[in-house]
Amino acid sequence: MSYRRAIEQLRPVRYPKQDVQEKVQSFLTEATMKPDDFFKRDNQKEFIKKAIAGQIIGKDGKKFPAISSRDKKLSAFRKLTDEPDKGSPERAVMDDLIKTYFGAYSKIDKIANGFSTPSSGSPKGEDWESLIAVAVNKINKLKWNEGLEWERAQKFWADYESPSMKLGNAFVKELKIKGKLSQLGSSTAPINPNWKGTNKTPKTDLIYGKQKISLKKFGGSQLMSAGKAESISTFEAAMGMYSIDKTGRQNVNNVMNQIEKRMGQLSTATTITRLEKLRDSGKKLSKADQAAVEEMEGLQLEADFLNKKLDSLFQDQTFKQYFCWEAATGQTKFNVKGSENAISNKLVVFKESGSIANTLALDSPNKAGKTIAGKNSFYVSFKTGGSKSKPYLSLRTKGFKPKLTEQITFRDIVLEELSKSQYGQNFLIESELEQLDEFQIFNRLANKVKGVAGTIKNAVKNIYTAIMKRVTQAFNYIKSLGKRLIEGLMNFLGVEVTDVKVSGSGDFALR
């Protein structure tokens, strides 16, 4: 070893300031007693024993005075079998005991009293799955201390047998499990080839007969995997289901009708040029002129208008239900051969202290989806409109004959119809120089129907009429696309979902 190398090894390791702060905060959090800590493993029993013996150590290193074994507050605490919910009468009993004899939960040293995580570590999600499976199989007098579940659970069994057995009994009683409970969550499963996300972990964690259980830790686990691609894929799955729902189909058709109506109104409203001059004059406008200006500005066909119309669909309660349904079940994600068991049909929320906090049968989007949607929401980001950087006339040749398919976009229609006449080509070149997208070009064309005269007006009117005719044909075709209804509309408008941000709370939080 070189001298320089030896000196470098003697130098103290310097951690970034943020890392040091995080480590300190993590240690302080771990060392502080919290209400749920009393019900982990045998902590409640040990706490009572130490309290009576006067052996509870405070954060200051001193021991708290002993409590009589006949103390009413301690006796009431002894009767609690699980962590009580905040604000409940049972929690009030516990809070009263701690406040009276210890001042606050934070004044009890968790580590010094032996109430912290044992040497085996703290079980993660898949560890709890195996612990519950082992406990259920032991209760049902089946082989429990062998196999894949036991291989994972055995390192935690000595420290977590008590809460695991409590959970096992709860599963047997509440979920009517009379046979072998198996773990599925540690495996992977094939996913739908159209799914953009790459996480192949099944939604099902535990399986018994037809019950395919998705297991969530109380106050911790989430229904959705993290990542933008996963959120967008879930969103696209919801679009497909919403498109064939009676309410969803009607709402999408209404949006198309509103867009088409707006496009038709653009050529019949009050003269735009006069109103633009009025608006930009700096003079105080009369109520009538102000109303006309607002109407003029409101009748533009633009990204904001389209986004609002689409957002009205995606914020619809029925759409949210389908989104939450897919997030919980994986119905679309795992709709491939070999992944049948990966699709969950039951949600179970458990507490580490040994009880089931909540269950939800994943029976339908209208029921289970609605329940989950109650405390969850998402925000969708769109990208709207076509490119502004390439010459439009180079996109199509004169011999091009368009076909009516979902691949034809509004952009295609506008550019093709303009390219069919000399006036349209001149108009395109003028618009191209100003770098306008297809919506802005259409707005300008519609305005010219009102603003020019003679043969030019006829040419403009013909182009505008041809565009509107093809838009109507396209919308009628899109309405026939069934499950691809929303997808077809978004493709036609050139709208792309760029991100879906999810937030939630409660027992069935998405993220």
Image (spheres, rainbow, N blue to C red):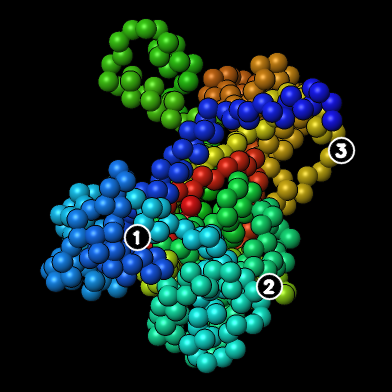
370 left or right of 389 in image: left
Between tags 2 and 3, which lies in front?
2
Is 21 situated above or below 327? above
**Residue 383 visible, this orientation:** yes
Give the class, few, some or many, for how many residues have Cα within 10 Å of label 3's Cα (few <14, many ≥20).
few
Q: Residue at x 51, y 76 (%)?
A: 132
How far apart marks 1 and 3 lie (CA) works out to 74 Å
Q: Provide the residue designation for mark 2.
A: 339
Between tags 1 and 3, which lies in front?
1
Q: Position of residue 268 (x, y in %)?
A: 48, 31
Earlier-in-chain disc, 2 versus 3? 2
Is 34 situated above or below 417? below
Q: Which residue is drawn at 60% across and 46% down?
A: 228
Q: Provide the residue designation for mark 3.
A: 399
Q: Are marks 2 and 3 in contact (CB under 8 Å)?
A: no
Q: Quadrant of the image for the N terminus?
A: top right
Residue 398 position by quadrant? top right
Q: What amino acid is at disc 2?
A: Ser
Q: Provide the residue designation for mark 1.
A: 36
Q: What amino acid is at disc 1?
A: Asp
Q: Position of residue 411 (x, y in %)?
A: 68, 36
Between tags 2 and 1, which lies in front?
1
In the current view of this chain or complex, which residue is farthest to the top?
A: 282
Q: Do the residues labelled 1 and 3 touch (CB within 8 Å)?
A: no
Residue 415 position by quadrant? top right
Q: Which of 96 and 223 is in front in this view?
A: 96
Q: Provide the secondary structure element on which disc 1 rests.
A: helix
Q: What amino acid is at disc 3?
A: Gly
318 left or right of 481 in image: left
How far apart marks 2 and 1 lie (CA) works out to 37 Å
